[in-house]
Image (cartoon, rainbow, N blue to C red):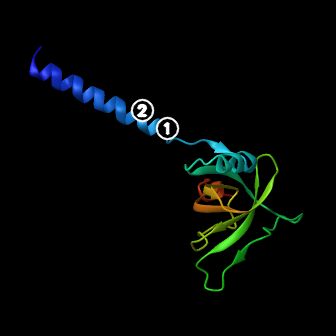
Amino acid sequence: MKKSHIFGIVVIAIAVMIIASTVGDASSYVTFKEAKELSQGGDKKMIHVVGQLKKDAAGHVVGIMESPDKLSFSFVMVDNDGQEQKVLHNKPMPQDFMRSEQVVIIGKYGRKNFIADQILLKCPSKYEEQKVK
């Protein structure tokens, strides 16, 4: 075998190992119930939960509490199964947070509450083309 063939096989083997290791880190969206079970099982991976902010009958967001220094906040989120959970986030509130239609939180369970390291927002109204009259 030529040295170039051996080098090519080694490169392919390394690429396969890298791909295989990243597949184990991939995460899918879960509910709060599944997230709590994963956290109790000792799983150290970040958990992705998708849902909406809790709103009252008039459509106003409820349950948001900012810290006095505005460097952290908490809110109530409802997952796709309808389960409510208080979420803590140790960073300032993202811009357009109150207007988001869907929220993805990435983090882990603490003792009683979900602690979000990241918050991803879905605000389709921001990207819709405005209609001209």
Q: Quadrant of residue 86?
A: bottom right
Q: Residue at x 60, y 41 (%)?
A: 28
- Of all residues, the one furthest to the top in this rendering is 1
Residue 89, picture quadrant: bottom right
Q: CA distance from mark 2 to mark 1?
A: 7 Å
Above or below 51: residue 29: above
* Badge 1 amino acid: Gly
Could you tell me residue 15's position as x and y percent? Answer: 31, 32
- Measured as percent of width and height from the top left, residue 75 is found at 72, 68
Disc sitting over residue 86 in the figure: none
Q: Residue furthest bottom?
A: 68
Q: Kindly state the secondary structure of the residue where label 1 is placed.
A: loop
Disc marking residue 24 = 1
Q: Which quadrant of the rendered structure holds the C terminus?
A: bottom right
Find residue 21 and report its horizontal and vertical position in percent. Answer: 42, 37
Mark 2 Cα-neighbour bin, 10 Å: few <14, some 14–19, many ≥20? few
Residue 122, can we see it? no
Give the residue pinned by disc 2.
20
Q: Is residue 128 shown left or right of residue 17?
A: right
SS assignment at label 2: helix
Q: In the image as oriented, which residue stretches furthest toward the left?
A: 2
The image shows residue 86, relative to residue 81, as above or below, that is below
Residue type at mark 2? Ala
Camera-side residue: 3 or 52?
Answer: 3
Q: Residue 25 or 40: which is nearer the viewer?
A: 40
In the rendered view, tell whether residue 101 sits above or below residue 34: below
Q: Residue at x 71, y 45 (%)?
A: 34
Crowding at mark 1 (Cα within 10 Å: few <14, some 14-19, many 20+): few
CB within 8 Å, label 2 to label 1: yes
In the displayed structure image, the side of residue 100 where residue 127 appears, left or right: left
Where is the N terminus found, in terms of image quarters?
top left
